[in-house]
Image (cartoon, rainbow, N blue to C red):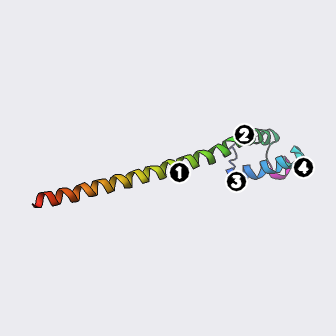
């Protein structure tokens, strides 16, 4: 028998239902046709992974700032090299 594959979106939807606690685990399992043990596993994964969602936002901001600094540095280097090339061209024409 082939195992059923669930999309990440489906799992997220079901875990949201679980976290609302408006229905029992058994009700949600029956409604979505997923074994209760599987639902428990998904809930554990979701709860343990929540902190990383916030960490990613912080690290994304850090990466963006580092990228912007790198771009600024590279433009400064381009300006410096352009000035040197212009100076060398003038020097060689004399």
Of the residues under marks 4 and 3, which one precedes in the sequence? 3
Within 10 angstroms of label 2, few (less than 14), some, or many (20 or more) residues? few
Q: Position of residue 39 (x, y in %)?
A: 79, 42
Q: Which residues are magenta?
A: 29-33
Distance, label 3 to label 1, CA atoms, is 27 Å
Q: Residue at x 79, y 39 (%)?
A: 40
Identity of the residue furthest to the left in this view: 94
Q: Position of residue 27 (x, y in %)?
A: 88, 48
Indicate the secondary structure of the residue bearing disc 2.
helix
> In the rendered view, does 65 fall on the left or right side of 71?
right
In contact (CB < 8 Å): disc 3 and disc 1: no
Of the residues under marks 2 and 1, which one precedes in the sequence? 2
Quarter-of-image position of residue 78: bottom left
Disc 3 target residue: 9
Q: Position of residue 18 (x, y in %)?
A: 83, 47
Picture disc at residue 23 = 4
Distance, label 1 to label 4, CA atoms, is 42 Å
In the image, residue 30 lies in the stretch drawn in magenta? yes
């Amino acid at each position: 028998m082939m195992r059923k594959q669930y999309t990440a979106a489906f799992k997220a939807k079901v875990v949201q239902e679980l976290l609302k606690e408006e229905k029992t685990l058994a009700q949600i399992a029956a409604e979505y046709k997923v074994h209760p043990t599987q639902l428990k596993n998904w809930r554990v994964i979701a709860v343990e992974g929540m902190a990383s969602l916030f960490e990613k936002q912080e690290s994304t901001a850090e990466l963006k700032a580092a990228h912007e600094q790198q771009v600024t540095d590279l433009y400064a280097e381009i300006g410096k090299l352009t000035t040197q090339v212009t100076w060398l061209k003038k020097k060689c024409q004399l």
